[in-house]
Image (cartoon, helix red, strand yellow):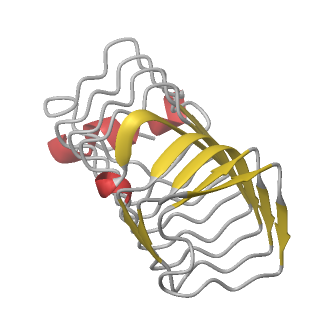
Amino acid sequence: MTEYFFEQHYHNLRYGQETLNLKEFESCTFTNCNFSDCNFIGVTFIDCQFNNCNFNTARINHTAFRTVFFNECQIKEVNFAMSDKLIFEIHFNNCTLDFSKFYALKLKGITFSNSSLIAADFMATDLTGAQFYNCDLYRSEFDKAIANKVDFRNSYNYTIDPAKTKLKKAQFALEGLKGLLYKHDIIVE
C-alpha cells in the first residue's frame, strides 16, 4: 500500500536505501536532503521541488517525476532511463548532472539552466523544444537523439554529429559551430 504525503517540507534529512519506497509526494519541498543511498522503487513525486539536495549515485527505478524542479542539486551518475515515463517532466537549475543517463526518454520542453552535464547520455532521447541555458555539455552523447527546436545558443563544449542527431530548427551560437563540425577536422576560428 502506497503512503501519500501532501504539501510537506523536509529539511536536512538523510534517506536510507528503502526509506522512500512505495511513497507518493505531492507539492512537497525537500531542502538540504541526501538521497545518495536511496534505491527508489515505486516512488512518485508530483509538483515537488528539491533544493540543494544530493542524489549522487542514487538508483532511480520505477520512479515517477511529474513536474519536478531540481535547484542546486548534485545528481552525478544517476540513471533516469528507468523512470516511469507517464507524464515525465523534470527541470534542472544550477545542478551537477555529470555522467547521468537520460537514454531513450521523452524530455520534450525540459530545461537545463546553469548546469554541468559532462558526459551525460542523451542517446535516443527526444529533446524536442528543450532549453540548455549556460550548460557545460563536454563529452555528452546525443547519438540518435531528436534535438529539433532545441536551444543550445548559450551552452558550450558540445560535440554533436548532425548526421546522427535530428537538429531541425535547433539553435546554436556562432561560437558553438565547431561542436557540430568536429568530425570533419575543420578548424573554426
**One can see residue 12 in this view:** yes
**One can see residue 93 in this view:** no
Q: Name, please, the residue furthest toward the front.
A: 1
Classify 83 as above or below 175.
Answer: below
In the foreground, 85 or 5: 5
Classify 56 as above or below 135.
Answer: below
- The answer to whether 27 appears left or right of 116 in the picture is right
- The answer to whether 153 appears left or right of 39 in the picture is right
- The answer to whether 53 appears left or right of 89 in the picture is right
Q: Name, please, the residue furthest toward the top.
A: 169
Residue 99 in the image: state x and y as whole percent. Answer: 39, 69
In the foreground, 97 or 151: 97
Q: Residue at x 28, y 38 (%)?
A: 125
Residue 159 in the image: state x and y as whole percent. Answer: 33, 47
- The answer to whether 123 appears left or right of 2 in the picture is left
Quadrant (top left, top right, bottom left, bottom right) of the C terminus:
top left
Q: Residue at x 55, y 68 (%)?
A: 75
Residue 58 in the image: state x and y as whole percent. Answer: 46, 76
Q: Residue at x 53, y 78 (%)?
A: 56
